[in-house]
Image: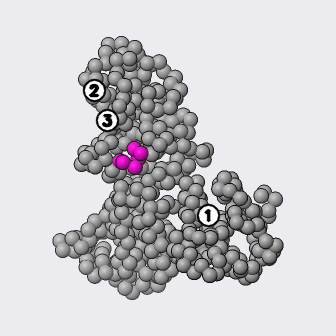
Amino acid sequence: MKSHPVSTPLALWLDPESPLGADHGQALQMSGWAVMVIQTMDDLMAHAPDAALVVLHLTTDITRLKAVQHLLQEAGLSTPVVCRVDRHELDLAVEASQAGALTVLATQDVRPASWQRVHAQLKPSTHRSAQTPVRQVVFVDPSSQHLLALARKVAQADVTALLVGPTGSGKEVLARVLHEASGRALGPFVALNCAAMPENLIEDMLFGHEKGAFTGAHREQKGLFEQAHGGTLFLDEIGEMPMHLQSKLLRVLQERQLTRLGGQNVIQLNVRIVAATNKDLKKAIAEREFREDLYYRIATFRMRLLPLRERPGDIIPLAMQCLLQQAAQPWRLHPQAQQMLLQYAWPGNVRELENVMRRATVLCTDHHITPAHLMFDDWLTQGHAADAGLVSDSLHTAEAEAMPAVPPVPTPMVEPMVASVPLPSAEAAVDQPTDLQSAVRLNEHQVIMATLASTPSKTEAAKRLGISPRTLRYKLAQLREHGLNMATAC
């Protein structure tokens, strides 16, 4: 594979039914492709990181396409797939296209021009790869796949879009998909969180200013609209924008031009607006907190992102993607850990999932995530406990994110792991866990006891655990309630 020239993209040819014919091989080579024939899914995963394309033969249904897409997603790859279908199987061709195939070709098609068109479809991503890496996104759940298909269609039309969904559900990720799937992909993607900027700075950030426009304006400054010229401007949390700025934003969207603060010259704009909010804008309109005319200007296409708990098919692939981002080595998720992730309510959505998996990588020493490594934001789950059934007493909130890598102590329900700190003898008094919640609680208590045994004071132990002394005292009280003798540990 490494013998192929850098400029020649590699296509993986997967066709268990028949070998690569001379006509097809010649057509691919004439159109600028290097071809590697593979036989199994293992071969696919071994060579997919170096491939620009997967060519897949379908016979009766799209099961093989789904399997390939799933494996690529789990590996964090966005390699496009071209499907080959018999020219008489029109329904199968349509189904493959709807399922996300880059394009569908007839198995009898040996024309170099067909593969040149495939080559042309990939050129935009090839040209921008030096500056903008291909974004790895997860849309595995059927509802997410439907949303992705809609986003790709909307991306082709130069219209505004409004993304609605709860905090942490991935609105900016979808905004970037809209940008990268559009004709503006080579242009800039500029983002502004309207809720994070002081009111008196948002106007200057958006529209820019001329030199001398106000005290401290020592030079001219382009606003975000100008910076996004030829690309996309993403206005996150637009529902928090002050009313007087909403009217100015509406005028810019209508006229496609602006004037900088303190300036006289009119600047023409070529920018696409994608807005996002977690608020009910219809309710905000009724309460006179949001302009109705601005709502209809930004909501040409309104797309709703579901909470993570309502798209369970995305949870495990997203978790694997998080793990791969932390370390490129192979990771494994224990089946019981997967079940815990699937049953949890995820009030913090994708952002909370990322935090949970980062904590797991801190605690895990062998790239095999077990239930003992999962620590949820239980302080957020007070109202979701009945739904999740898995609210644990794990270390609290953001304090756990800073926890040093204290190796977890083995419990009877998970595979053995190395524990470098000996346990106090009181450990033997703990009953064996009978469910996931008890196992997580037991493991947490064991970590606390092991840390206390290896540090000179409770203050030092709290520092090492990444929690406050007050939280440690609360945890020790829990230990006593479970009948542990803390005399030796304290």
Q: Along the line of sight, which residue is nearer the eye, 300 or 40?
A: 40
Element assignment for label 2? helix
The residues colored magenta run 339-344
| Looking at the image, residue 348 lies above or below residue 31 | above
Residue at the image position 77 percent from the left and 58 percent from the top: 1
Snapshot quadrant of residue 211: bottom left
Snapshot quadrant of residue 17: bottom right
Element assignment for label 3? loop
In the picture of the structure, the residue carrying the numbered disc 2 is: 478
Instruction: Compute the Cα span from label 2 to label 1.
Output: 50 Å
Res. 79 mark: 1
In the picture of the structure, the residue carrying the numbered disc 3 is: 393
Q: Along the line of sight, which residue is nearer the eye, 443 or 299?
A: 443
Residue 139 x, y percent position in the rendering:
48, 63
| Looking at the image, residue 397 lies above or below residue 244 | above
Residue 405 x, y percent position in the rendering:
49, 33
Left or right: 1 as drawn, with respect to 98: right
Structural crowding at the residue carrying mark 1, measured as other residues with C-alpha within 10 Å and reported as few (<14), some (14–19) or many (≥20): some
| Looking at the image, residue 81 lies above or below residue 229 | above
Of label 2 and label 3, which has the lower sequence position? 3
Q: What amino acid does circle 3 point to?
A: Asp
Residue at the image position 56 percent from the left and 44 percent from the top: 331
Q: What amino acid does circle 1 point to?
A: Thr
Our reading of the magenta stretch's main secondary structure is: helix
